Image: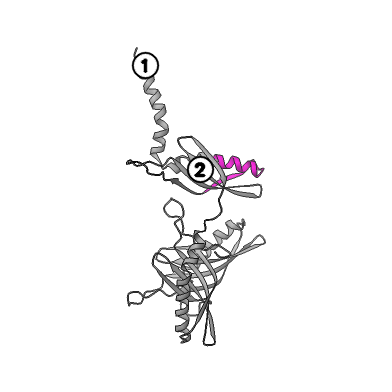
Amino acid sequence: MRSTPVKKFFALSALAIPAMLYASQPLEEALQPSAIRVAQQRGASELECPAAEAKVLKKHAIEEPQMGGWYEFPHQAEYTIAVSGCGKRTTYLVICNKFQSACKAGPVPPPTPALRQLADELQPDALKAAQQRGSKDFACPTTTAEVTRQESIVEAETTGWGAEAPNRAVYAVTVKGCDQQTAYLVECDKKKKDCVTARLQPSPPGPKQLADELQPDAVRVAQARGSEELRCPAAAAQVNRKETLEEAETTGWYEVPHHAVYTITVSGCGKQTTYLVACDKKQNRCVAGSPGGG
């Protein structure tokens, strides 16, 4: 007669174990082994490489729509997983559902136009900043400015919830006026609503500048990204140009520069690409713009 409660206890315990596992760690961590397994299996088949290995590039829990008065906890997680082996490589977007105990792997959708839109949105501010700088440098009230290249900057992932929405863009701008011409690097920040400029030329000789100080970090970021995108671990990075950016004076007091911008070429394995790298000393990080503009 006493066996019935015991049986019920074990039955309830068995059902509670998965819930306890999900509660003891973030959802994206709990579902990650399943996501990796699904991506690896599909990649091994499509690459025709049984020994293919899977690596998680990004992951985050998917917030559920809040329809009622109670908070609905996430039950899905999304992963970007690269699978490589036998000299080939592919990337999948994997979505896992803890209630269905299943994961599905599909192709990674094309990049969102948000990056292009941000660079287009901030371009008038970049042109204005470059034109004002050119008028000052040339002592010429009538100048014209033209963007020759623009890059939206993808922010580094720092929260574990995927990459931050882009809010900065970098431009190469040519300014002409009064029979003079020069080029500037302009970095615009949507959050701060300002743009900073620097001449697009190598730093002059003299005391060590901020661009010299931050150069090792810029080179490391460009080399890491180039090695990944060129699929060449031995890729080398070379700085073509570098410049410390003058900060916008908004308080009436001179602000010590803390931004530097670089153009860096990464080459290896018979391939080559070039990045615009923006470094911020205050935030202690550098980010590389996508090659080829946009």
Judging depth in this view, the residue of 71 and 22 nearest the camera is 71
Query: Whole-percent x and y of residue 70?
Result: 33, 40
**Helix, strand or loop at mark 2:** strand
For disc 1, the marked residue is: 4
Query: Whole-percent x and y of residue 31?
Result: 47, 40
Q: Is residue 51 visible?
A: no
Few, some or many residues within 10 Å of mark 1 (<14, 14–19, 20+): few
Task: Tell which circle, 2 or 1, labels the residue nearer the N-terminal end.
Answer: 1
Asked if 216 appears above or below 21 in the picture, the reply is below
Number of callouts: 2
Specify the quadrant that holds the C terminus.
Answer: bottom right
Q: Are marks 2 and 1 in contact (CB under 8 Å)?
A: no
Q: Nearer the viewer, mark 2 or mark 1?
A: 2
Q: Is residue 20 visible?
A: yes
Query: Whole-percent x and y of residue 182?
Result: 53, 80
For disc 2, the marked residue is: 95
Query: Whole-percent x and y of residue 222?
Result: 54, 63
Judging depth in this view, the residue of 36 and 95 nearest the camera is 95
Q: Residue at x 41, y 63 (%)?
A: 283
Which stretch did the figure color magenta?
37-56
Asked if 206 appears above or below 167 in the picture, the reply is below
Specify the quadrant that holds the N terminus.
Answer: top left
Q: Residue at x 49, y 45 (%)?
A: 78
Magenta run includes residue 90:
no
Q: Identity of the amino acid at label 1?
A: Thr
Colouring style? one colour
- 153 left or right, relative to 8: right
Q: Identity of the amino acid at label 2?
A: Ile
CA distance separating discs 2 and 1: 40 Å
- 17 left or right, relative to 70: right
Magenta run includes residue 47:
yes
